[in-house]
Amino acid sequence: MNLIEAYNLSISNSLTGELIVENLSFHIKRHTCLGIVGESGSGKSMSMKAILGLLPSSLKTTGCVRFGDIEMIAAKQETLRKIRSKHICLILQDAMTAFDPLSTMGEQIIETFCENMNYTSCEAKKVTLEVLNKMMIHDPLLIMQSYPHQLSGGMLQRCMIGLAMALKPEIIIADEPTTGLDSINQRNVLAEFKRLREEGMTLIFISHDLGVVRYLADDVLVMRHGQCIEYGEAAKVFTNPDQPYSKYLVDTRKSLTKVFGELINKGAATSC
Amino acid sequence: MLKVESVYKSYKKQNCSIFSSKKQEILHDISFQLQCGECLGLIGESGSGKSTLSRLILNLERPDFGKITMEGQPIQNWLESHRGEMSVVFQDYTTSINPFFTIEESVAEPIRRSKCKYDKQVVAAMVLHLLEKVQLSSRLLMRHPHELSGGQLQRVCIARAIATQPRFVVFDEALSSLDVSAQTQTLLLLKQLKQEMNMSYLFIAHDLPTITSLCNKLLFLSKGKIVEKIEVQKISQVQTPYAKKLLASVLPFD
Amino acid sequence: MNVWQKLKKDKMALLSLGIIVSIVFIGIFAPFLAPHDPLAANIKIKFAKVSLSYPFGTDQLGRCILSRLIYGIQTTVFLSIVTMLLTITIGVLLGLMAGYLRGIVGEGILRLCDVLLSFPSEIMILAIVGMLGPGIGNVVMANVASKWAWYTRMIRSLVLEYSDENYIRFAKVAGYSKRYILCKHLFPTILGKVLVLATLDTGWVILNISALSFLGLGVQAPTPEWGMMLNEAKNIMTIRPSLMLAPGLAILIVVAACNFLGDSLRDALDPKHNQIKGMKL
């Protein structure tokens, strides 16, 4: 069953008439992960924001996006807000700005639970601890007492994922969640996403890094200049891309790790 | 060439009262050397003190203890007597170029400010040549920084950094904020430039793949200390748990 | 795209600029444009209605209101421009110094600013004018004295903000001289922001000069000045309220034009600002 279906999604600037995203069509089945790849400025995040109705009014969205039996493009702001709080969770790149710097992590997470899940604060506290424990965070109590700036970007991102998971949405949209993190943190965050996948969460994962997308996604959508270049199964797109642009992306990604891979293999060979 | 001897640096802790002298140590007993023509990689997670170290080497800040020398001279003196021979490319390309300057002005500035005085035509020709070197079209000359993409902008920064033909360039996470495809292209460019111009690099990064494909030597920096030094060729034989953890964090892709 | 081209596309900016420029011109050519001598009283025709020879009528002494308004530009608008120029010059010089040359010089300037800023500006102005006595020069001095400290602080914080930008760092590494970095990199960046503030503040100064005249501390009668005219009209407000209209509207229009121009300048001077308002692409 398709959870989200998008047909001919286009975004244009109503002032200049410039097309930002052109005729994008895709769908996500329940319990799968769709990866969207493309260079910066290709319209990846823009189309996700359009689906959630988060674009400024100067940008016009056309097409048809179906979430269950709701038409998202034509939907009222009120319905969209309900969907955003209950059914779709958005995880953004910069976790640092996603939290309020003036209150502790614990307060914020508990408040979100009380607001969205109708927990009492006591229950919320329990759930928070549970969630943080689940995320393999060593000292959840300490994390809850600290302010966002005292934690690393990776830790914040993991808290964000934990939070999103505990809200039990039907789908999580992650917009470049690992960009800007160092490689150890990136790996930790990715491990959390992998776990999410294994628990059956539906995911849309946006990244410019093919390696990351390959690690998580079942289907891949390659975007460039607002257009869909290739859309298909991840295994196929990554091993045997149809389009030259997808091939270019795969090749550049390969050559980035080539030297490193050779060195590691050589080391493995000599140590044997 | 560059010699860093037991350098310490600490900052005053924030949110403490003015009178307390509690300090947070950022760098602890850092020593290493960089030979001429070498490319040294400095790797560490965020908050390990990489950028602080680069600022010390660039003489933007002074170390609390220890010496940083270049060809035997203290770094401040060396920078004064060898203007334009050291250069830098920063991570955040969006603030690296004055937003009021065109690309041409930005690239030409180091040439115009150097000791030798050139004619206008010569400078223009040099700028064109530099842009060619970093594989940028001359159509971009009259544009402003915000009209360029990230990859293009970082190339402009590289062109500006090599404009005075420096012998030593610091790359402070110069690739980290670029797209993967732009990273690969820039990496190739850096390799090529290194051969052509015979420069020494100090390359700071947080991920191994980029650093291993460019550098000959690696320093692992963790919590302000150098935990391991190793030749890139022997990367698979790292000993310390931190280095092993970094090695394991690389996503395979083939 | 340069600033002028951007401003040209902004209708509000063009209108404001047009108003300000034409008012300045009218002020300069006041002797040729004013239909009457602004000081010539003719008690016989006091409170004259609007007519061809007296387009805005006459005041309680029979002086032509239009002529007084036109000559008033020379005092009100020109004085405020002079005040603003002086304030900005002092503010930029000291602010750049305080921000870039830290140490004793910077600290000294800052503490002086703190002392001045601890007085409410209206009280400062009243105190200075009170001590030196009313008069054009003193009004300008009082306004500058109450404003420069604020600008210095403002510009210093801007300098601190921008000297952490990577292009300044690069310039330092490349070994450019301090003066060059200040003049070429910091000054243009800051000037944009300061100009915007200054246009917004010009309105404030006009109001201030008018207010001082209104209180009888600024320009002295019979010199035509918009605040003075309001003050005189106030005395006969009960019989002729319409007399307050002309100077009041004149002040309103100039102040509004300055404010709108400031807003547009801010947009135009920002090289990143796109044509689409409130949207970053």
Image (cartoon, rainbow, N blue to C red):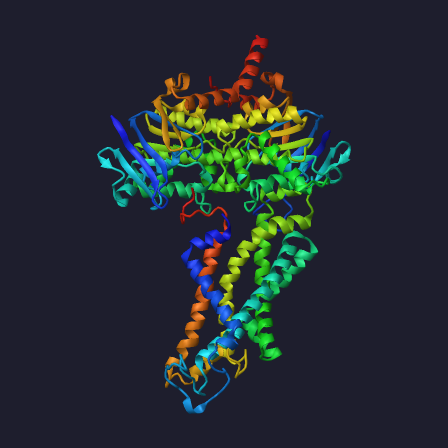
Q: Quadrant of residue B128?
A: top right
Q: Quadrant of residue A98?
A: top left
Q: Position of residue B157 (x, y in %)?
A: 58, 36
Q: Position of residue B26 (x, y in %)?
A: 62, 37
Q: Residue at x 44, y 27 (%)?
A: A190
Residue at the far top in the pictured view? A272
Residue C216 vertical placement versus C157 (above, below) = below
Q: Residue at x 44, y 91 (%)?
A: C43
Total marks shown come to 0
Q: Is residue A189 left or right of residue B81?
A: left
Q: Residue at x 58, y 58 (%)?
A: C153
Q: Nearer the viewer, residue B92 or A121?
A: B92
Q: Is residue A164 left or right of residue C82?
A: left
Q: Is residue B137 left or right of residue A189?
A: right
Q: Nearer the viewer, residue B161 or B14?
A: B161
Q: Quadrant of residue B130?
A: top right
Residue A129 vertical placement versus A217 (above, below) = below
Q: Is residue B53 visible?
A: no
Q: Position of residue C225 (x, y in %)?
A: 50, 77
Q: Residue at x 42, y 92 (%)?
A: C44
Q: Position of residue B216 (x, y in %)?
A: 64, 21
Q: Nearer the viewer, residue B97 or B211?
A: B97
Q: Is residue C237 visible?
A: yes
The quadrant the N terminus of chain B occupies is top right
Residue at the far left in the pictured view? A69
Residue at the far right in the pictured view? B72
